[in-house]
Image: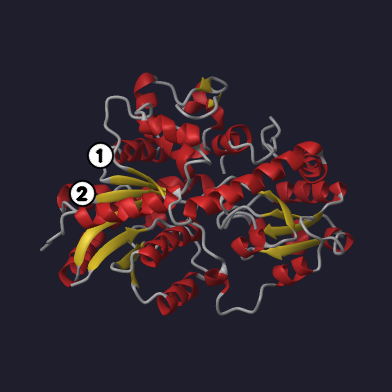
Amino acid sequence: MKDTIVLYTSPGRGHLNSMVELGKLILTYHPCFSIDIIIPTAPFVTSAGTDDYIASVSATVPSVTFHQLPPPVSGLLDTLRSPVDLPALAYELGELNNPKLHETLITISKRSNLKAFVIDFFCSPAFQVSSSTLSIPTYYYFTSGGSGLAALLYLPTLHKNTTKSFRELGSTLLNYPGLPPFPARDMAEPMHDREGKAYKGFVDTGIQMAKSAGLIVNTFELLEERAIKAMLEGQCTPGETLPPFYCIGPVVGGGNGENRGRDRHESLSWLDSKPSRSVLLLCFGSLGSFSCKQLKEMAIGLERSGVKFLWVVRAPAPDSVENRSSLESLLPEGFLDRTKDRGLVVESWAPQVEVLNHESVGGFVTHCGWNSVLEGQKMIKAVVVEEMKVGLAVTRSEEEERLVSAAELEQRVSELMDSEKGRAVKERVVEMKEAAAAAMRDGGSSRVALDNLVESFKRGCMAQLG
C-alpha cells in the first residue's frame, strides 16, 4: 500500500485551491506519496465551477483523489445571512461533519498507509477526531500567512488577559507579538463578539494548533521575519512548546488549472493591448461582495482617477434584492460606456493568478485575503502596509455604513499608480517577488522547509484504524 497524506479543506474556493496546490507541491518534489483531499459540502458557499476544477485536477494529477462529504442534516447551514457569518458557519459545519469525516478516514486507512492528516485552520473541529480519537499525526495548514498565524496563536493568551470583547476595547491598541500595534476594532468583524461562535472557534483553534504535530504556513521567511521570529521564540504561545513550524510558501497555482477547459479569458486578451504596468486590478476574493452603494462609490472614484483598470465585480450578498440586479444597474448610469476605452468590468470571476502575472498589471486593490496578497481584514492590512511595506492603506469612513468613499479611492489609486510613494511600494513588491522565487528554488528556505515537512510525514506513525 502507498503512503498517503490526507488534506481536509474548508468551504470556499480560495481555501480549496490553496489546499490543492499544497498537495501538488508535495507531489512535485516527493512523488512517493498519494494525496487524498476531503471536501465538505457547504450550502452557504457557492460551488460554481468547483466540479470542473476538481475534474481538471483529477485528470491532470492522478495521484490526487477527492472525497466529497455529503451535506450535514441541518437547516442551520442552508442560508448565508451575511458574509460576517462565514467563520461561524464554517466551524459549525466542521462539527456537524465529524461523524462522516471519521468514517472517511477509516475507509482511506483500509486501502493505504495513512501517514498524516493536514487540516485547514477552519476545520479545527476535526482535530478531536483525527488526533484525539484516531491518533493520526495532525498538522494545520494556515493559508493566510505568518502574521495571521502569530495573531491566532496568541489569541488564547489575549482571551485570558481580558474579559472585554474587541468591540468593547474599541480604539485600545492590541500588541500582538511580531505584529505592528493596531486598534482592537480592526480585528475581523466576526471576532468582535466574545460570546459568538466565530470568536470561540478561533480561540479553540489557537489552543489546538499548539498541540498539533506541526504548523504549515503559506509564507516565506524573508517576507514576515518579525512574526516568524516571535513564533519561534515562543512569544505567541507563552507556557506552551510550539510544534514544528514549516514556512513552505508562497503556495500559489500557476493559473492554468483554474482556467483549464475554457477559452482564454477576455480579461487577458484585453490586458494584452495595454502598456506595461499601466493597469490597476480590483478583485476581492471568491466571497467578496459589496453593497450597491459601495460599488457606486468605487466606480466614481475609479472614473475620477483616470487610471486604466480591470475590475472584477461580484453581486451584493445572496439574500439582497440588489443581488438580482444586472451589472449595469449596480453601477452609476453611463459608467461602463464612459470608461470603456480604459477600463474593463468583469462579472464575478477572472483568472486572478494569470491576471496578476500579466505584464500590464501595475497595481492591485484587494480585501487583504491572503490568496490575494500572494495572490478582508484590517489587521492584515496593517501588516501589508506597515510591516511588509508592499501596499497603501485605503480607509473607510467613520459613518454608520463604513464605506470607502469615492474621494478616498481616487486619492489612493492615484497615489499608487502615479506618485513616488507608489513607485517605492512597487519596487518593494518586485524585491519580494524575487525573494519568493529564491525561497522556492533548490536550497531556498521554503524548499528546505518542505523537505523537512515530508521527512516529518515519513516518521509519523502509520495509522491503523478499524
Tell me the kind of residue under disc 2: Ser
Estimate the x, y position of residue 375 in percent, counting from the top left: 57, 54
Estimate the x, y position of residue 359 in percent, counting from the top left: 72, 61
Q: Is residue 90 above or below residue 353?
A: above
Q: Is residue 269 visible?
A: yes
Q: How is the image coloured?
A: secondary structure
Which labelled disc corresponds to residue 131?
2
Instruction: Answer with left or right where residue 142 lies relative to residue 115.
Output: right
Instruction: Answer with left or right where residue 309 lies relative to residue 39.
Output: right
Q: Secondary structure at mark 1?
A: loop
Residues under labels 2 and 1: Cα distance?
A: 9 Å
Q: Which is more N-terminal, label 1 or label 2?
A: 2
Instruction: Answer with left or right where residue 145 lies relative to residue 329.
Output: left
Location of mark 1 (residue): 211
Q: Is residue 271 above or below residue 331?
A: below
Q: Quadrant of the N terminus?
A: bottom left
**Which quadrant of the view contains residue 338?**
bottom right
Which labelled disc corresponds to residue 109?
none
Q: Secondary structure at mark 2?
A: helix
**Which quadrant of the view contains residue 163?**
top left
Estimate the x, y position of residue 126 in percent, counting from the top left: 28, 51
Name the foreground residue: 313 vs 250.
250
Tell me the kind of residue under disc 1: Lys
Q: Quadrant of the C terminus?
A: bottom left
